Image (spheres, helix red, strand yellow):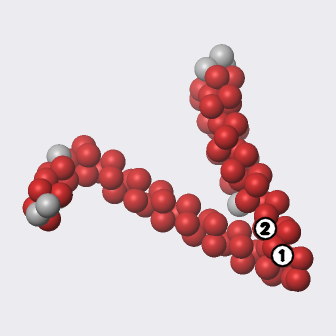
Amino acid sequence: MKASNFFTSLSNPIFRRLYAAQTISLFGDALTWLGLALLAFELAGKSSPVVLAGALTLRVTAFVLSPLAGVVADRFDRQPILMITHFGRMLLV
């Protein structure tokens, strides 16, 4: 497979922006995982593996339960939901 064939999909500007946005999102997600691990190590010391395991379990649980949250969110107005979740995440971070 030639490299030119591999990058032909990037000639589409909509796909190129979507691909760039996904790449940036994944980079931010990786930094979040790293920051979480460092924070657990700094706060918990020797018991940091247990703290990190609990935090990562909660994080994965959120990904698993997100389809159910989507069903609930479809029943309400989206703008207040978005505002509440964004401000809640801002306070947590």
Bin the neighbour count of mark 2 within 10 Å (Cα to Cα): few under 14, some 14-19, many 20 and up. Answer: some
Q: Decide: is 67 above or below 61.
A: above
Q: In percent of the image, x 65 and y 36: which residue is there?
A: 66
Q: Decide: is 92 above or below 61.
A: below
Residue type pointed to by label 1: Ser
Whole-angstrom CA distance, mark 1 to mark 2, is 6 Å
Please provide percent x and percent y for residue 77: 63, 21
Give the quadrant of residue 72: top right
SS type, badge 1: helix
Q: In percent of the image, x 70 and y 37: which residue is there?
A: 65
Give the quadrant of residue 76: top right
Q: Which residue matches tag 1?
A: 48
Q: Which residue matches tag 2?
A: 52
SS type, badge 2: helix
Residue type pointed to by label 2: Leu
Q: In percent of the image, x 82 and y 60: which residue is there?
A: 54
Q: In percent of the image, x 67 and y 40: which residue is there?
A: 64
Bin the neighbour count of mark 1 within 10 Å (Cα to Cα): few under 14, some 14-19, many 20 and up. Answer: some
Please provide percent x and percent y for residue 69: 68, 30
Q: Which mark is residue 63?
A: none
Answer whether labels 1 and 2 touch (C-beta < 8 Å).
Answer: yes
